[in-house]
Image: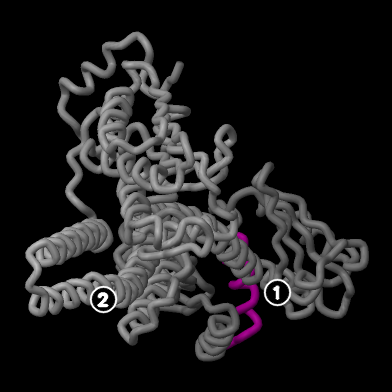
Amino acid sequence: MAISSITERSIFFRIYAGLLLICFLVAFFGYFLMQAINQQRLQSYRESIATVAFYLGTASYDRRSVEEKEPWLMAVGREFGSEIHIVPMDSLELKGRELKRLKEGKSVVRYDEISRHSTVYHAIDNDGSVLSAELDRINERQIHAVMGFLLDELQHYPSLADKQAHLARLSQKFGYSMALLPLPTLGLDREQFDRLSAGKAVLSFDNENQRPHLSVMMASTIPNEVLVVTVPLFNFFSLDVIISIILICLLLVSFGVYALIFPLERRLQLLQMGVNKVAEGKLDTMVQVAGYDDIARLSSTFNTMTRHIKRLIESQRELTRAVSHELRTPVARIRFAVDMLADDDDYDSRQMQKQYIDEDIASLNELIDEILTYAKLEEGSPKMDWEMVCLKELLEQIERETNALGKPIAIQIKPPAQKVVAMADRRYLHRVVQNLAGNALRYAKSTIIISAGVKKGMAFVTVEDDGHGIPEADREKVFIPFARLDDSRTRASGGYGLGLSIVSRIAFWFSGNMSVDESPSLHGARFTMEWPVKQVGVVIVADELTGAKSEKKLIGTDE
């Protein structure tokens, strides 16, 4: 589960893991590709070697008379160490490729991986038959036999020049060097010279060149002229093949890397397009959020930022319009009172006008304080002094302060147990409950109920009243700054329409939410704020946590 989470969330981990997987798969593919290529190359090598030997053998067979052919097959079979048969071509189950090779005068080799034996077929000219032999491994006896076939072939060319010309044609036909060379130019040692003199084949390996090869030498019928056939040895690690496979693997790796990077590049391009649109003033722009990685979180943050910027601009406009509207009435009253003071000589009347001016100034101060509080909460993240707050003590404090106002409204609290605490900024949490209680006092008929608690890791405070309540269609409007409803909650009830907006913003910065519905017991409005008992990424004083955990009941339970 943890590995899956890291894979989903970390771009670099995905890229590194993807590159590692690509390299592993490409190496795996490269290995099997080289094995397949080498098997094909080895098969071609076997068939090219067999074609030379059996071409010469069938040519020698064709030159024999009918009476000589059967003894010749037996003699050659003994020389090869394997029986040689003549079988009709129609009796063989030949594939298209094999049939084509036979018709082109080339040998077909069927290699058995289990027995490691090779069955060789070569067509006999104008006969419809095939020369067949089963061979194990190439040995010196077989090489000697093939050289004998070649010498027998050269007997039909009388002069040295004719022999050299025929060998040149065979070299061009099969791709192997065949020539008659003077004995002194070969640089043979005594043992090799003796073998040549005894009519045996001499083998010489040359590993010094880039491509190792085997030279087979045998004395010819011409004095001091030696038949030399040079056969390149099969190289499993051919430089050309290795370079080709490396280039293919690099191409596959580049495609794999492109497949890894392209989705990220595309998402970054979409994000850049979103930034450009926002720069042009299109604040409704939203980018797609896919997955849980860094780019997804960046896209989500970008969307949140654009929404916040748009809301700030709209809030600023609304605030400007609302403030100018709200200031107009008290300023007009102050202006009227000042004019009355200038024209009124009665002392009592002047004192009354002065009192009106003081009340309007106090009203302005209250409005300015509300505006500053709302603006502070709206502009950015305010500084929170997180602590573990006892909800019971908070409700008791609100009860005392509300009763001190002397309103004829019964205040009932339903506090949780003393041990129930929640992480919060006490000053802002107090402001929330105070605003909700003050709002309820303005609209309640006789009773308000204040309660708090913790359920399933979420703390809550609730304030209910027995007023007329709020219609369901208007419940979202009460949290809009300076919003006024057309029912019983009118301007005559007092306030500026910022109290619930401030409460809503505090809930936002508490990572919680505000809601309003109908009170089930009082049938008026019920306002509820919920927020997490523990704030993610917040560290508070150690002794507060220790004190909170010392209780028998864990934080987050309620009686």
253 to the left or right of 83: left
Residue with the mark numbered 1 = 106
Residue at numbered disc 2: 328
Give me the residue at 29% from left, 71% from top: 326
Asked if 498 appears above or below 112 in the picture, the reply is below
Q: Nearer the viewer, residue 8 or 110?
A: 8
Toward the front, the furthest residue is 346
Comparing 181 with 513, the one in front is 513
How many numbered circles does the render carry? 2
Amino acid, disc 2: Arg
The span picked out in magenta is 143-158
Between disc 2 and disc 1, the foreground one is 2
CA neighbours of label 1 inside 10 A, class few (<14), some (14 to 19), many (20+): many
| Apparent side of residue 25 relative to residue 250 in the rendered image (left or right) | right
Is 241 in front, or is 469? 469
Q: Position of residue 56 (x, y in %)?
A: 67, 72
